Image (cartoon, coloured by chain):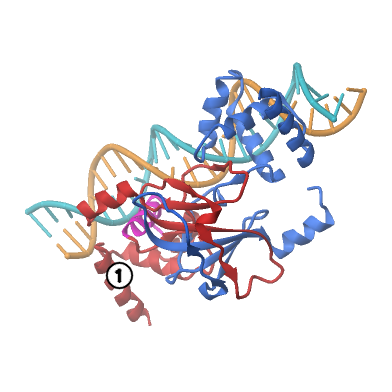
Chain colours: A blue, B red, C cyan, D orange
Amino acid sequence: MQATAAASFRDLCRQHGLAVTHQRAVIYESLMSFSGHPSPEEVFERVRKHIPSISLATVYKTLHTFIESGLLRELSVHHGSLRIDTGRHPHHHAVCTQCKSVFDLEESALQPAKLVGKVPKGFRVERMSVELHGLCRDCAKSKSRNPIQ
Amino acid sequence: MQATAAASFRDLCRQHGLAVTHQRAVIYESLMSFSGHPSPEEVFERVRKHIPSISLATVYKTLHTFIESGLLRELSVHHGSLRIDTGRHPHHHAVCTQCKSVFDLEESALQPAKLVGKVPKGFRVERMSVELHGLCRDCAKSKSRNPIQ
DNA sequence: GTACCTGCAAATTTTTTGCGCGACA
DNA sequence: TGTCGCGCAAAAAATTTGCAGGTAC
């Protein structure tokens, strides 16, 4: 088990061009042990139990490394600060995972998704919005020019 | 024009149970003058040109007031810290706009949305995810018990 | 008149950075 | 062995809070 997980983490790192370190392995294991969507602080607390000397800065750096390499995703694109959506009518967003810019899409640009499965018990849906994730033109260009980025 | 906008802002406030103040009106006007998704700091800078004495704290408080009353929306749920999505397979989210908890949905819970319109020029779509916004069971309960919250 | 709003300053929280030592490739 | 990662401490950025005076209703 342990060995298998470790082996797959090595592979993951290889696939994403990352060095394998003890800290990264433990952070990754810890992440996978959460059921929800942990914050850096929560990850830190859990990792600490295995590596008491680890620093929060390392957790931050590692999470960014993981996200940039594509090994993990952020829950929603994080701008480091609150952003206001001024649109009066609902609309959708196309967000660039690299530079984090957000483009608005007309609501009519998407045929609405349809709920065919279960929603959490008692959840009262008020709005449904779709996000496209990908690369904007500029980032796509610089990425194809420089694929290992 | 000016008068119309001011009048509609008064109405908006009435509808949402908010007192009408000069600061709130200017902040609202400023918000509507942005094309993108402004941060509190950006709003502050723009509002400052009209009310040099305004404080950043007021902008923060006002934005929260607007969001809580439903007069505005946040671009995406802001947790005050980075959140990691550990899911290996893509999936969707149901987020509670009140308590901000996030529930994962199976990808199969939604019939995928279909792109029928235009995406920003050159945008390379890599992933499409759907978010349901609404109230979770607990928040829905406390809201119906206490509708003006 | 009362309850709510504002501005100020300080405190908190979240995130980033620089640097010297040590570990991976 | 050289490069990259780690821990530490300090700095920067983002957000919240308490309070005293002022304003909307």
In screen coordinates, is B76 left or right of B55?
right
Which residue lies at the image location 47% right of the left edge and 44% below the top edge?
Answer: B80
Above or below for C10 versus B20: above
Give the extent of the magenta segment.
B52-69
Residue A69 sits in which quadrant?
Answer: top right
Q: Label 1: which residue?
A: B12
Which residue lies at the image location 54% right of the left edge and 72% below the top edge?
Answer: A111
Q: In x, y percent, where is residue A4? A: 70, 27
In screen coordinates, is B64 left or right of A8?
left
Q: In x, y percent, where is residue A11? A: 76, 35
Look at the image and tell me whether residue B54 can be seen: no
Viewer-side residue, C18 vs B40: B40
Above or below for D20 versus A140: above
Viewer-side residue, B105 vs A103: B105
Residue A24 sits in which quadrant?
Answer: top right
Queried whether the magenta region covers residue B55, the answer comes back as yes
Q: In x, y percent, where is residue B119? A: 64, 71
Image label count: 1
Look at the image and tell me whether residue B72 can be seen: yes
Judged by its main secondary structure, the magenta piece is: helix
Residue B13 sits in which quadrant?
Answer: bottom left
Viewer-side residue, B38 vs B51: B38
Q: Residue furthest bottom?
A: B1
Above or below for D5 versus C21: below
- Give, as a three-letter code, the residue at label 1: Leu
Q: In x, y percent, where is residue C23? A: 76, 20
